[in-house]
Amino acid sequence: MNLTQTVLFIVPILLALTVHEYAHGWVAYKLGDPTAKAAGRLTFNPLSHLDVIGTVALLLFHFGWAKPVPVDPRYFRDPRRAMVWVAAAGPGANIALAFVLGILQRTLVESGIIGFYSIPHIIIGFTVFINLMLAFFNMLPIPPLDGSKVVAGLLPLQYLERWIQFERSGWIIIIGLFFIGSMTGIPVFKPIFHLARVLYWMFTGETSMF
């Protein structure tokens, strides 16, 4: 991408990451944990959520991450169940944002306010799509993704220790899957892409342009 395209696309990505992390902190705060608020993370300022390495990786490889919101389960009445809600909040917020923007895009196009493949159409469409991709990727049950925390909160206690041991190797698994995909051409994460395209069509009424 040239500089203009990079600027146009980096804003939707930062928005998706910011909404994702804010939702984690907001739900934790509502359940009794003030840690994120005390750390200044209950904000929509993307600078408060950026991770240096994750941002550089995002610019260079188009895959990155934000700085995780701090959560202290000791503040929760039922830490395991509360962590399920906290973990699910990030992907849930991304899907909700994608839905709202999808309806907005459909309304603007049908009313003739914006045209197909105009800059506003592309930006809104990309924002919808990247939020869906971020949500579904994070719901994979692989540590440290949000899906693994949901699984940890729902597992019977007798299996929890094994799952905690599995969590220690989570990043290795994720990096390994990306490496296998890039080296072999096997579309490891293609199902996520297809699922995002289906919801993109449901929300916007259009075939995904991405």
Image (spheres, helix red, strand yellow):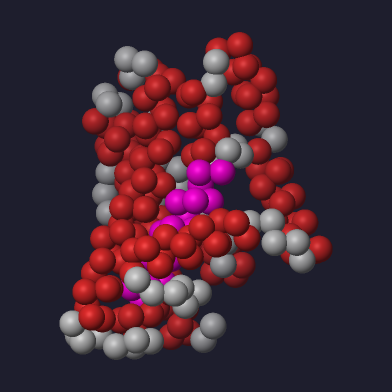
Q: Is residue 208 left or right of residue 114?
A: right
Where is residue 50? Give x, y as percent.
Answer: 43, 55
Query: Magenta-highlighted stretch: main secondary structure?
Result: helix
Q: Is residue 130 magenta?
A: yes
Q: Is residue 130 visible?
A: no
Q: Position of residue 80 (x, y in %)?
A: 44, 20
- Is 23 on the left or on the right of 83, as rendered? left
Front position in the image: 125 or 10: 125
Q: Is residue 10 visible?
A: yes
Determine the image quadrant of residue 158.
Answer: top right
What's drawn in magenta, residue-wise?
123-140
State yes or no: residue 169 in magenta: no
- Please, is residue 6 above or below residue 14 in the view? below
Considering every residue shown, the one lying at the far top of the view is 158
Residue 4: horizontal and vertical position, in percent?
A: 43, 85
**Viewed as shown, does residue 164 lie left or right of 29?**
right
Q: Residue at x 45, y 83 (%)?
A: 5
The N terminus - image quarter? bottom right
Q: 28 and 121: which one is in front?
A: 121
Give the quadrant of residue 156.
top right
